[in-house]
Amino acid sequence: MSAISDGLLAQLRGLLGGAVHGQNIAAGIRVRGISAQLGWLVDLDVDDAPLTVEIVPIAAARGHKVHTVRFALGYRTPTTVDSIRALAATRALARIVAEHESETDQPPISTTQRIRELTNDDDALVAVDGPLPYYALNPYIGCTIGCRFCYAQSRLQPLRLRTGASLTPWGSWVDARVDLPERLAAELASRPPRPIKFSPIVGDPYPAIERRHRITRRCLCAIALASPGWTAFVLTRSAAAADDLETMSQAGRIALGVSLPTIDDEVRAHFEPRAASIAERLELLAHARRRGVPTFAVVQPMLPGSPDALADALAQHTSLGVSLDVLRGEEQAGPLFDPPAYAAARATAWQAERVEDLRSRLQARGTPIWQDLPEASG
Ligand code: SF4
């Protein structure tokens, strides 16, 4: 299989009519960068403060505040830009998109391949600004673990169509970014260090094909060889990360985390049938700690199961602590919440209460709780 380019960055450039990197699009509003890995994102400076605007095909609009004929735009929160200026910047961008959108019609379907090898010409590291700025790194886009609640799917499925691929169900496709390690190595030598988060939004770094391509492993090796200012955080629902504990351990500045939405493996099997069992995930963390690899966990979404037992496991197995987050919409998982044992968990109030309950249990155990990154990484 030869590698192909997904062309998404070129389409975004077309949509913006060349308004990229350093160009003013309105008074006090300048384009700082664009990327196409976490969705179509345009980084702006608005009166010298950073603002990120997402552009999605209109069919994927979910609370995006500004619409053109074919696309919807919305700015990311939290941001330090006030809401009136943020909306003005989003509208300024929408005017440019409206001018050019008829030139970027969706390409005809050219492939039904579910596993693709892709090359890209965009940055390997995607800068994400916030209280703790970091880079996102995505060895794979799409995911064959296929959790039905995964919020990546509504962002990625419409964009996948724009790469000329047929629409196949979430969980049945993945794009392997085969040239990523080489591009990463070059950027590690030239860009200012920030913590790197592996696959925070668009996939898992350990789909089954990682054992063939070893893209994640080769990226970890590049980080291990880079200057000591570079740190990384790898988050997975797969036990295959154990393959790379040697590399992580030798690097000394790569942390490993698992997603752990429940302690009950029956619940896990109901909601995440293709992901590693709870026992495998805890063993992975225990193994990592024995090797001296810092460990963390992300509890998202909240799923039923004993909160006390979950807090015990999180306290025991994480050295860097835990991040907590709620269900971000049911996506394709609606029927999974229908059985009486799971029905309460679909409610926003139940999710919020479980976060607070878990938070107090973790605090009582002295386990750090953080939002975007462990505090120690800032
Ligand atoms: S493992 Fe992560 S990226 Fe993959 S489907 Fe599940 S939640 Fe989404």
Image (cartoon, grey):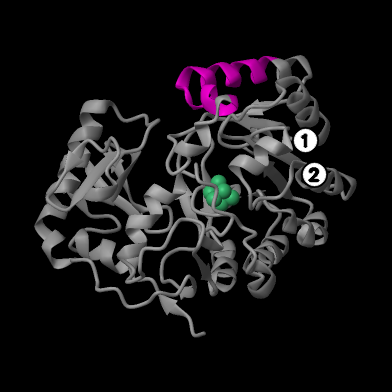
Q: Nearer the viewer, residue 339 or 269?
A: 339
Quadrant containing the C terminus in the rendered view: top right
Q: In what element is the residue under mark 2?
A: helix
Relative to 157, 364 lies left or right = right
Tell me: residue 347, above or below residue 140.
above
Q: Residue at x 63, y 74 (%)?
A: 213
**Residue furthest bottom in the image:** 2
Q: Residue under label 1, please give it.
A: 318
Relative to 109, 91 lies left or right = left
Relative to 235, 336 lies left or right = left
Return the x and y of residue 216 as percentages of the image width and height. 64, 63
Q: Residue at x 59, y 62 (%)?
A: 188
Q: In what element is the residue under mark 1?
A: loop
For the record, the magenta segment spans 341-360
| Quarter of the figure with residue 324 | top right
Q: Earlier in the sequence, mark 2 or mark 1?
A: 2
